[in-house]
Image (cartoon, rainbow, N blue to C red):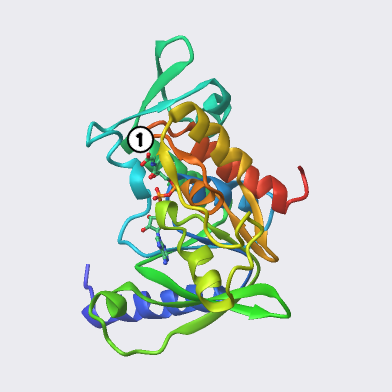
Amino acid sequence: MHLEDVTISKAIISRYQEELLEALESDVAVVGGGPAGLVAAYYLARANKKVVLFERKLSVGGGMWGGGMMFNQIVVQDEALPILKEFGISYTTFQEGYYTASSVEAVAALTLGAVRAGAKIYNLISVEDVMVRDNRVTGLVINWTSVDVARLHVDPLSVQCTYVIDCTGHDARVASMVVKKLGPVLKTKSGSLEGEKPMWAERGEMATVANTGEIYPGLFVAGMAANAVCGGHRMGPIFGGMLLSGRRAARLILGEE
Ligand code: 48H
């Protein structure tokens, strides 16, 4: 079969351009493709919302790949088992209430689930700012991660959405941007980020779900970012809370909770 090199290039450029144009207006923009972001994207897309997910790295999965200290197994508790089952992730009972799963299978299944549900994933793109109109987050400012890494002075582009979910993990990047630009306006005790507390798996897991919610009009927070914003404990390599938090963010946006 004859193959034209330049036709391959044309196919990639034109298809990607179409996909990027599609990202300009959405119902929900998820920032960060870790477990919380992927699960939120899945449930929202499954409910027919137009969902875009921006991930600054080459691969999605965030901190899930490495399990605990690079042992690529994750632990999940009873409450999150229905989500493992929903995505078809196989698991083993370690002892009552403690289940393990391959972190590699988990990332692959969450990613495939989100994509097949209709969420569009844009990797290698970093969110560097927010758009705010009339005291509401109305969109995001995006740029290639390579621009950021190379410290190039290149202006970004903007995308518009009805809701943003900050799923950027420990750094809670979007919430931090809002505070940096607007001051202490978040729905937290101080109005700013309360900061993550030390390791305590049980408390941290409950808090990450409880802290999931709208922290500024139009801006939701989920996963580890929820504890960084609202002051919850970290929990180590147990991932049920991340999955439950992503699902809760979707349910809140869908008005189901
Ligand atoms: C685009 C961005 C940007 C940006 C960051 O860290 P994550 O895996 O986040 P969660 O909340 O889904 O899961 C947290 C979990 O992995 C974890 O760290 C746990 C359980 N820790 C416990 C403990 O005690 O340490 O994923 C966040 C994703 C990453 O892929 C980032 O690359 C991405 O967000 N990201 N994407 N624009 N500005 N900032």
Q: Is residue 111 left or right of residue 150?
A: right
Q: Quadrant of the N terminus?
A: bottom left
Q: Is residue 180 left or right of residue 123?
A: right
Q: Number of labelled discs?
A: 1
For image coordinates 44% across by 42% down, the residue present is: 197
* Furthest residue in direction top, as rendered: 96
Q: Which residue is mark 1?
A: 105
Q: Quick one: SS at disc 1?
A: helix
Residue 35 in picture, x, y percent from top left: 45, 44
For image coordinates 49% across by 32% down, the residue present is: 240
Q: Quadrant of the C terminus?
A: top right
Residue 66, above or below 44: above
Residue 190 in picture, x, y percent from top left: 60, 59
Name the amino acid, label 1.
Glu
Q: Sort mark 1 into few (<14), some (14-19) or many (20+) by Cα contacts within 10 Å.
A: some
Residue 19 in picture, x, y percent from top left: 49, 72
Q: Quadrant of residue 32?
A: bottom left
Q: Quadrant of residue 156?
A: bottom left
- State whether residue 116 appears in this view: no
For image coordinates 39% across by 36% down, the residue present is: 106
For image coordinates 69% across by 45% down, the residue present is: 251
The foreground one among 6 and 176 is: 176
Q: Quadrant of residue 246?
A: top right
Residue 93, above or below 76: above
- State whether residue 138 appears in this view: yes
